[in-house]
Amino acid sequence: MDYNLLPKTQIKVSKICLGTMTWGRQNTEKEAHDQMDYAFDQGINFFDTAELYPIPPRQEEQGDTERFIGTWFKKSGKREEIVLASKIAGPAAFTQHIRTDKKYSKKSILTALENSLKRLQTDYIDLYQLHWPERPTNFFGKRGYDYKREDFWEENFEEVLDALAEQVKKGTIRYIGLSNETPWGTMRFLNASDATRPRVRTIQNPYSLLNRTFEVGNAEVCHREEVGLLAYSPLAFGVLSGKYRGGKSPENARLTLFPHYDRYSSDPCKNAVERYHELAQKAGLTLTQLALAFVNDRSFTTSNIIGATNLTQLQENIETAQIRLSKAILTEIDAIHESLPNPST
């Protein structure tokens, strides 16, 4: 396993990060524990979760993912060997069951953090992230930005950082990160940090062969400001595994169970998948290997968040850390991207 430093820290994290959002809906507690055992044995020391999980969010399971991690920490005694990331949920219709006040206020951050720490059976989180912006902007599959009257939001970057700074000072958070953030939002947080306010270390955004929009703006921010990408959905909800090719709907697969997650199911996406599948065969790789190795290869990727619902998938995903794509294959990937740029919606 290869490791990178979280930017501007001395914390080493595995190039592959274990994603957890299916635990509690598609995976049982035992299956989650089995995944953590296997991942740890393969050198993965970086787990990512959220108070919102599992996904799709429902009140009856909310927080179960963190609980499963907590019981694994208690059973295994490996908390100190894991770099743990979690997130606070922001305003959205699907978070009504979590908190009444869903803004990133001092009170909300304290409440969310205390609840996560209790479920995780730990007294600190290594990387605490804002799951998505409070303000209305383009994230979760929305490409274009439409200005809307913002009666419910005023710029509060300093206030949010001040609230997080209190927790850093207490030791309940070590470092902070963003998620589903835009270049403007990232820069505003960076500009608001100072000697007393913590600096953003990472940004967790979608990035895959079907969605390279991160390269427009955010990649330069990461490079120039020393912020690391934690890439999520590198397999585009499993579409880039190839298992849905030809109209297939595998039993218990994510998009079979939850077809409304159709961000990567358009005809342009299907066309792109076929092109990448042909390239993978030419390179002697599976489509999964090509897709994950590409994300691993990016200079701005600190860690690639992979999620799996069984150990066979997890094994293949982790093994991609050792695959290096040739310049010729990367050139062909870029050629496909030029002809079918960012087909996901």
Image (cartoon, grey):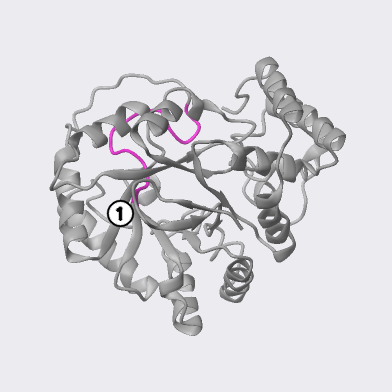
> 235 or 257, which lies in front?
235
Q: Quadrant of the C terminus?
A: top right
Secondary structure, magenta segment, majority class: loop
Q: Quadrant of residue 269?
A: top right
Residue 101: horizontal and vertical position, in percent? 22, 51
> 268 or 3, which lies in front?
3
> 47 or 6, which lies in front?
6
Seen at 80% across and 38% down, the residue is 245
Q: Is residue 135 magenta?
A: yes
Q: Is the residue marked by circle 1 packed among few (<14), some (14-19), or many (20+) residues within 10 Å?
A: many
Residue on which disc 1 sits: 175
Numbered-mark total? 1
Position above or below: 243 against 58: above
The residue stretch that appears in magenta: 129-142
Q: Quadrant of the N terminus?
A: bottom right
Seen at 45% across and 29% down, the residue is 219
Amino acid type indicated by mark 1: Tyr
Seen at 85% across and 41% down, the residue is 284
Residue 178: horizontal and vertical position, in percent? 35, 43
Helix, strand or loop status at disc 1? strand
